[in-house]
Image: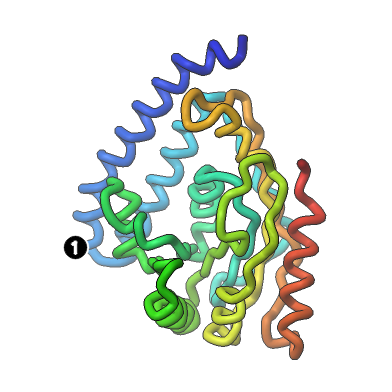
Amino acid sequence: MQKLISYPLSVIYYLFFFLTLIIFHPIQWFCFNVFGYQAHKKSVDALQFCLMRCANILGTRFTFTNTYNIDTNQPLIIVANHQSLHDIYPITWYMRKHHPKFISKIELGKGIPSVSYNLRHGGAALIDRKNPRQSLPALMKFGEYIETNNRTAVIFPEGTRSKNGEPKPFQTKGLEILFKKIPSAVVVPITINNSWKMLKYGKFPMGLGTHITFTVHKPLKVSTFVNKEELLNSIETTIKNNINY
């Protein structure tokens, strides 16, 4: 019965979702080209809020638990498990004071209203996973940007999304580069639960009544770890031990 109900609700959801992306594309362009970075960021923040409201059509709820007072005047590296695209806009919204910037595959830099524009102009790193000659310099430049401007790098070390919530092994090369290029960063591990259920039937229809949770764990200062492998292991263990699957 729930799957049957999800068909018409999914149509309504996708209508509002894509309409939101289309509306915010020229808004982003205007803010960026007329008023600059800060105005563009506010338009992107508003976009994330609206995307969350679109998800509410499906009965989706979001809970973001953060018991730590994280200084905004420092670079951060957010490390999280990855379950669906519905991980992205809540992190951007709830961590908006920290200016989150994502590492994304280069294909997303074209063709998607609002999303592609923000990736190209908002400070993200667009990498070609099949081409180390492109991806490594892009990551290094991204890390330098985060360090210089006290922004936040967001990375999903699994590389691909988990379709059933079960975590995949972390690929550490990207994190190792970020640690070198953002030496003053604080790492913020985040565990995401249940966002995969939004796509439990595939892209259509959508899952209904999903409660997506984000749990922020104790921040870790990169400079306090001489052995970066110890830091990597601590991050991965903390995140995975709190995944429910």
Quadrant containing the C terminus in the rendered view:
top right
Residue 124 placement, left or right of 162 = left
Tell me what residue is drawn at x 53 percent, y 43 percent: 86
Residue 72 to residue 183: above or below:
above
Image coords of residue 243 (percent x, y): 76, 49
State which quadrant residue 18 falls in: top left
Q: Is residue 185 visible?
A: yes
Image coords of residue 118 (percent x, y): 33, 57
Image coords of residue 190 (percent x, y): 67, 58
Tell me what residue is drawn at x 56 percent, y 64 percent: 155
Image coords of residue 25 (percent x, y): 25, 47
Tell me what residue is drawn at x 78 percent, y 79 percent: 230
Three-letter residue code for mark 1: Asn
**Residue for badge 1:** 33
Quadrant containing the N terminus in the rendered view:
top right
Q: Is residue 149 visible?
A: no
State which quadrant residue 42 falls in: bottom left
Label 1 element class: helix
